[in-house]
Image (cartoon, rainbow, N blue to C red):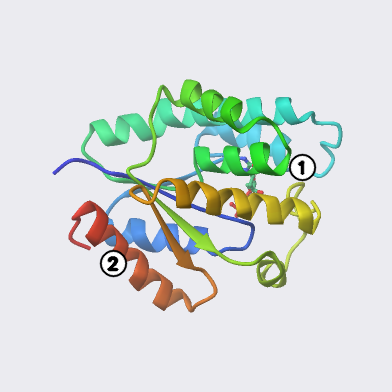
């Protein structure tokens, strides 16, 4: 059986991390995330999420995300797939296109090329978008907010719009699920999508 690469995407508080964990467990897959899926990535993540990183330029932000991703692909994703393990990641390149492209306003095609370069052309076999309106998501974030979560509603609306546009443009490789349902209901739909699209017994 070919090892598959599955990404979860969505805005803040969309429940991705919970669903990524549940799916990885059900599949016996390697569970990982961005930014911060490696030791080097954890240090890059510290810079990226710290609200004290005020002056970070949008291009520098995109490059740090790309650096985190390059390391993640080289150290975790490709070796795991090569060893025959499925990989489930909490965020991948589409997050850069949504946040740095649609959110920050960097040219979408340039951000896509940067992702392509950072990953050596590796894209997920399936990307699952958990669609949750930002106001619903904010109510779920009951902790101190990081640098991205402090962005205004307009920013988050552009990010979600970006994810929806990517999913609509590539329906073969994307599944959009309503992320406002219960954890169990979403998990069942996630497994259903993985069965249908990737023919995996889960
Ligand atoms: P994290 O705490 O992992 O948030 P979440 O639980 O919402 O995934 O923080 C990651 C933040 O980084 C999140 O706000 C999205 C942002 N991000 C980007 O802006 N670009 C990227 O390429 C990635 C991977 C994440």
Please give the residue where the numbered disc 2 appears in the rendered image.
192
Mark 1: give few (<14), some (14-19) or many (20+) Cα within 10 Å.
few
* Residue at 57% in and 43% down: 95
* Residue at 71% in and 37% down: 48
- Indicate whether 159 appears above or below 137: above
- At which x and y percent is residue 42? 60, 37
Residue most extreme to the left: 1
Compute the Cα span from label 1 to label 2.
37 Å
User: Foreground: 21 or 114?
Assistant: 114
- At which x and y percent is residue 110? 60, 25
User: CB atoms at circles 1 and 2 under 8 Å apart?
Assistant: no
Sequence-earlier tag: 1 or 2: 1
Please give the residue where the numbered disc 1 appears in the rendered image.
50
User: Foreground: 200 or 41?
Assistant: 200
Mark 2: give few (<14), some (14-19) or many (20+) Cα within 10 Å.
some
Q: Residue 129: tell me if it is visible.
A: yes
* Residue at 53% in and 30% down: 112
Instruction: Determine the image quadrant of residue 15.
Output: bottom right
Q: Secondary structure at mark 1?
A: loop
- Indicate whether 192 appears above or below 62: below
* Residue at 35% in and 70% down: 189
Q: Image check: 68 left or right of 87?
A: right
- Indicate whether 151 appears above or below 56: below
Q: Image check: 64 left or right of 194?
A: right
How many numbered marks does the figure carry?
2
Mark 1 or mark 2, which is nearer to you?
2
């Amino acid at each position: 059986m070919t090892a598959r690469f599955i990404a979860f995407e969505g805005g803040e508080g969309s429940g991705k991390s919970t669903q990524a964990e549940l799916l990885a467990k059900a599949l016996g897959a390697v569970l990982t995330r961005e930014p911060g899926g490696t030791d080097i990535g954890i240090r890059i993540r510290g810079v990226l999420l710290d609200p004290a990183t005020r002056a970070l330029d949008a291009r520098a932000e995109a490059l740090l995300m790309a650096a985190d991703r390059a390391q993640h692909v080289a150290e975790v994703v490709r070796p795991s797939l090569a060893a025959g393990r499925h990989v489930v990641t909490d965020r991948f390149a589409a997050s850069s296109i949504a946040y740095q492209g649609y959110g920050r306003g960097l040219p979408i095609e340039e951000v896509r090329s940067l992702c392509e370069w950072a990953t050596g052309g590796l894209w997920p076999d399936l990307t699952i978008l958990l669609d949750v309106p930002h106001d619903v998501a904010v109510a779920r974030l009951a902790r101190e907010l990081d640098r991205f979560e402090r962005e205004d509603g307009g920013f988050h609306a552009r990010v979600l719009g970006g994810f929806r546009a990517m999913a609509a443009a590539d329906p073969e490789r994307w599944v959009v699920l309503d992320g406002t349902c219960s954890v169990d209901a979403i998990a069942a739909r996630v497994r259903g999508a993985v069965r249908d699209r990737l023919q995996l017994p889960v």
